[in-house]
Image (cartoon, rainbow, N blue to C red):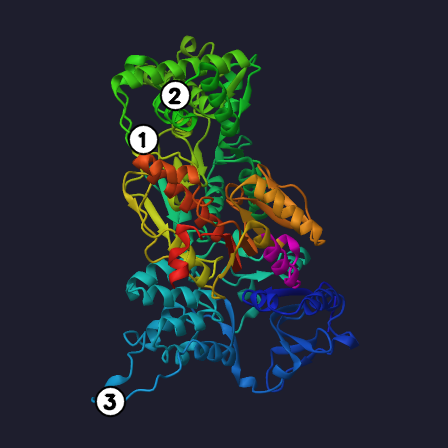
Amino acid sequence: MNTASVTLRLLDKADKEILKLPRSVKGALYDFQHKFKANPHATGLHLKQLKGDSRLWSARVNDEYRALLLHLADTDWLIVSVKHRKEVYENLDRLSYGINQVTGAIEYVDLQVVEESVLRRTAPPRPEPTPRVQPELLQPEPLFAGFSDQQLTDLGVAEPLVPVIRTLTTEEQLLGLIEYAPQLTGEILLYLFDGKSYEYVLEQVTAPVAAPEPVDTEDFQTAVERPATMVTTTDEALREALEGEDFGRWKVFLHPTQSKLVERDYSGPARVGGGPGTGKTIVALHRVKHLVEHLPQGRNKQVLLTTYNKNLAADLRARLLELGGEQLLSRVDISHVDQLALRVVREAEPGSTKQTIDDNQVLREWRAMLDELGETAWDAEFLHDEWTQVILGQAVASRTDYFRARRAGRGRNITRPERAEIWQLAEKFTQRLDRLGRQTWAQVAERAARLEMERERRIHAVEQQRAEHDGLDNIHLQDGSAGWLRHRYRHIVVDEAQDLRPGHWKMLRAMVARDRNDIFLVGDTHQRIYNNQVTLGSLGINIRGRSARLTLSYRTTRQILGSALGVLSGESFDDLDGNEENLAGYRSVLSGALPELHPSTDWDSEREAITELIAEWEDIPLEQIAICVPTNAMAQQVAVSLAQSGIRAVEIGPDGPRGDEGVHIGTMFRFKGLEYQRMIIAGVSEGLVPRAEVIGMQRTDALRYRRELQRARSLLFVAATRSRDSLAIFWHGTPSRFLQPLLAS
C-alpha cells in the first residue's frame, strides 16, 4: 500500500472519549498519529483488520490501548474510538458504523457502550406491594411510541440505535443514549421529546443538513468530506483535542439547527437569543461569513463585527480567522464597540487629547467631587447611573429637558427640586472632567452617536436631492464631507448585545442603511453584567418578528446547567425589546457530575480547601482550571495561597489572561466569553454575593435593589456556566441566598 501523504482524521465523539483517558494515553496517542502518518504499516503499530470486517482496523497506541480506525480509501484513515485492548477484539457485532442515508455523514456507534449508559440511568426498582391492577398497565409508555422506525430514520436518526430508542421510557435514559449517540440523532430525539412534531423536526433540524444529492452509503471518501461529518484533521487541532485545550470545536462549527438562522434573508434587524453554550457566537461568526460571501467584489470592509470589550473582540478575530482565513478577515471590520465609538470621535476631533477613563475611575471622580462639595444627600453610584443612563442615555441637553426626561426602571422617584440638584451636580461633574482633560466611555458613545446620526441626516439629504433631480448628484451638497457620503457599513453583526449602552445602539443604527439584513445581533439578557438595559425598538432597531432562540447547550453539562438555572430562580428578564425573556426548554446534550458544594468556617480555610482540591486535579492542564471570586483583593489572596503550594496562577485582567501557564483567577466580571474544563467559584457568601451594599438598598431604593440583585444573579450565572466538566462552589460563613436552590436539592 502507498504510504505517501497519509491522512489521519478524528471523528467527533471520539475526542470526547479520549478526554476521559489517562494523560499518559493521550500523550501516546499524539505520538501514534505522527508515526501512523509516516507509515501506517510500521511494525510497532500492529495495524490489522478486525475479523470479519472489511473496513474496521485496529492499531497499537501503547501496550494497553488500541485505536479503532475506519479505512476510508487508499491513504485515508479515520479514528473512531480509542479503547483498552481487552475491549477491542470481542463481541465485534456491537461496533456499528455506516453512512447516514439522510445527511451522508459517517456515523459510528458502540452499541454496548450506549446500552450500558442507558442502563446506568435506570433507577433501581423500589420494593412495592402486590399491585392491585394488571401488571401490563404498570409498564411505562416508551418515549417515542408515537413515531415509527421509518419516521425516525427519515429524520436522520442513526438506524442501529432505533432498537435501543424503543426501550427508552425516561428522560434520564434518553440523556444516557445521547451522550454516546451521533450528535444529529441526539438533537432529533430531544426535539421530539420536547413535543415538537415530526414535520417541525424534519424542516428545522433535518432539512438544513440533508445531503443535496442521493447518498451512496458505500462511498466513505465522499462522506468524510461532507460538513455533517465532524472531523479533526490537522496536527494542531488533534493536539488541542488530546490536551483538552480547545474542548469545543463547536466554537467554529455550525450545528445543523443553527444554519437556517445564518442563511436567512431578513427584512430588517434580527436577533438570536439563547443560554450559555448554545452557539450564539458561532451563529454570529457564520453570519459574518455568509454576508461577506454575498458582497460585491472589492477590498473595502463593508461588514462590521463588534462586541462590548477588547478581549472578546480579539477572540472573535481569532475564531473568524480560523473559520475563513485572511480573505474573510479582509472584508470585515472587527472592533469592540467602545473603540469604534472612540475612532468616530477622534475622526471628528483630531486634535483632542482627552483621556478616556473606565467606570471605576469615574466613580472615584464622583466620590472625590462629592467629598469636596461636602455633599452627603446623594451617593456616587446613584448619580453616576442617573447621569449615564438618563442624562447621557437620552441626550438630555438642558435642565428643562431633564425635568421632562423619562426615568423608567431607575428606582426611587425624585421630586422636581431633587432633579434640579442632580442637574447642577451633573453639570459640575462634566466641568470637572473637562478641566482634568478626561472623558467617560458613556460620553464617547453618546458623542459618536450624535456624529453618526448627523452623518446619516446628511446622507438622507443627498439622497433626497438626488431623487428630486432625476438621480443626478449635487456637488455642493457633497462638498466638505471629506469624500462622497455613504453609510459606513452594509451589514453590522453584534455579539453579546445585552451589554451595549443606548449610545452604542444609536451609533450602530446610524452607521448602516435601514435595509434588508442591516443589523444582526446575538445575546442573552440572563448574562447581562452591566446596567445597560435598553429597548431596541425605541432606538430605531425593530426586531419584532425577526427573533429566534437557541435552546441546546453544547458546552455545559445538564447537571451544571440545572444548578446555574437554580441561581436565576425567581427573576424575570427582558428580551431587549420590552418583552419577557425565559430559558424554557433550554437543555444540555452533555452529562456529568453534580456541582460540588464546599462550606468553610472562614476565608483562610476556604483558600486552603481550594488549594487542596486543585492539587488533586493532576489529569488536566492548569490552564483549563479557573477560580472566580467576588473581588480583586480576594483574587490576589487566592493567587498567594496557590503560590505557597507551588501552583502557578495567572490573573485575568481587562484584556484577558496575563500569561500562558497557570490556573486562571479573576473576578466574576472577567469571565464573560471564557470557557474551562473545571471551574471553582469561591467566596459565594452572603454579603459578598450579593454585596452588602446591595442588600442595604432594600430599605432605601427598592427598585434599584431588585435591579442590582438581578445583576448579581447574572454574574453568578455567567461564572457557573463557564465550565464544561465540573463545577465546585465554595463559601465561608453564611452561604449566598442564591445558593438556596442548590442547597435544598
Vertical position of residue 557 compared to residue 522: above or below: below
Q: Find the distance from the CA under tag 1 to the CA under tag 3.
A: 61 Å
Vertical position of residue 307 compared to residue 114: above or below: above
Q: Find the distance from the CA under tag 3 to the CA under tag 2.
A: 75 Å
Q: Amino acid at mark 1?
A: Arg
| Secondary structure mostly taken by the magenta-highlighted segment of the chain | helix
Q: Are marks 1 and 3 in contact (CB under 8 Å)?
A: no
Mark linked to residue 410: 1
Residue 610 part of the magenta segment: yes
Vertical position of residue 680 compared to residue 523: above or below: below
Q: Amino acid at mark 3?
A: Pro
Q: Which residue corresponds to mark 3?
A: 131
Q: Are marks 1 and 2 in contact (CB under 8 Å)?
A: no
Q: Which residues are magenta?
A: 607-623
Q: Amino acid at mark 2?
A: Met
Q: Residue at x 67, y 59 (%)?
A: 239
Residue 576 part of the magenta segment: no
**Near-viewer residue (680 or 350):** 680
- Give the SS element for disc 1: loop
- Give the SS element for disc 3: loop
Q: Which callout, 3 or 2, points at the residue further toward the start of the chain?
A: 3
Left or right placement of residue 568 versus residue 20 in this view: left
State whether residue 536 appears in this view: no
Q: Which residue corresponds to mark 2?
A: 453
